[in-house]
C-alpha cells in the first residue's frame, strides 16, 4: 500500500492549525483545480468525530464521488479520515499536530491508499498517482499554512463560532 508522508511547519498555534485542517470550507478553497464540492454529510464548517462528508470532484478528466468518515479525533493533536465509498480500494489519512516551544506547529500527514485493479492499479500508483496525490496534499497544506500564519484564518474560523 503506497504511503505519502508530508511534514509542514506552520508559524501558528496548534489549535488554529488543527481547526483549519478540519475545515470543509478551507478544503474547498484548496481544491479549485478539481472543482471539489461537498454534496452530502458535513458540507461546511469543521468536521468532527463520526461525521462524514461526500465530495464530488474531477480527477484525470473523470467526475467522481468519495465519501469519508472521521474515525479518530483528538483535538488538537490528531484526526483520521477514512474512505467509506469511492473509486479507490481504500484511503486512510492521518493528520498529526505537534506544538513546538517557539509557537510553531508541526503538521504531519500520513496518507495511505490502495488502488483497485490489482497489478494495473499498482503500476498506475508508481507511475502517476502517488505523485499526483502528493502534489494535491502539498497544495492543501500550503493553503492551511497561508491562512494560519496571516489573518485569513479568521475568514474560516470566525464563521464557525
Image: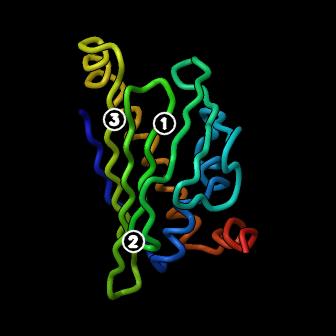
What residue is at 59 percent from the left and 50 percent from the top? 27
> At which x and y percent is residue 78?
39, 65
Q: What is the spatial separation of the Cα atoms under label 3 and label 2, in whole angstroms?
A: 22 Å
- Pointer 1 residue: 84
Find numbered disc 1 in the image and state the secondary structure of the residue it sits on: strand
Q: Is residue 123 above or below residue 15?
A: above
Name the residue nearer the viewer: 129 or 160.
Answer: 160
What residue is at 32 percent from the left and 29 percent from the top? 114
Q: What is the spatial separation of the Cα atoms under label 1 and label 2, in whole angstroms?
A: 23 Å
- Mark identifier at residue 99: none
Q: Residue furthest front?
A: 50
Image marks 3 and 2: residues in contact by CB distance under 8 Å: no
Find numbered disc 3 in the image and state the secondary structure of the residue it sits on: strand
Image marks 1 and 2: residues in contact by CB distance under 8 Å: no
> At which x and y percent is residue 63?
62, 21
Q: What is the spatial separation of the Cα atoms under label 1 and label 3, in whole angstroms?
A: 12 Å
Image marks 1 and 3: residues in contact by CB distance under 8 Å: no
- Pointer 2 residue: 77
> At which x and y percent is residue 127?
28, 21
- Pointer 3 residue: 113
Amino acid at each position: 500500500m503506497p504511503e505519502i508522508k508530508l511534514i509542514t511547519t506552520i508559524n501558528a498555534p496548534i489549535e488554529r492549525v488543527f481547526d483549519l485542517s478540519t475545515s470543509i470550507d478551507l478544503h474547498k478553497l484548496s481544491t479549485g483545480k478539481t472543482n471539489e464540492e461537498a454534496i452530502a454529510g458535513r458540507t461546511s464548517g469543521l468536521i468532527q468525530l463520526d461525521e462524514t462528508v461526500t465530495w464530488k470532484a474531477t480527477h484525470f478528466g473523470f467526475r467522481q464521488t468519495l465519501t469519508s468518515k472521521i474515525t479518530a479525533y483528538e483535538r488538537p493533536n490528531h484526526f483520521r479520515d477514512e474512505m467509506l465509498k469511492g473509486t479507490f480500494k481504500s484511503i486512510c489519512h492521518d493528520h498529526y499536530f505537534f506544538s513546538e516551544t517557539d509557537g510553531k506547529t508541526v503538521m504531519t500527514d500520513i496518507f495511505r491508499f490502495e488502488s483497485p485493479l490489482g497489478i494495473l492499479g499498482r503500476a498506475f500508483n508508481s507511475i502517476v498517482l502517488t505523485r499526483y496525490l502528493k502534489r494535491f496534499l502539498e497544495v492543501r497544506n500550503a493553503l492551511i499554512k497561508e491562512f494560519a500564519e496571516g489573518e485569513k484564518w479568521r475568514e474560516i474560523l470566525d464563521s464557525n463560532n
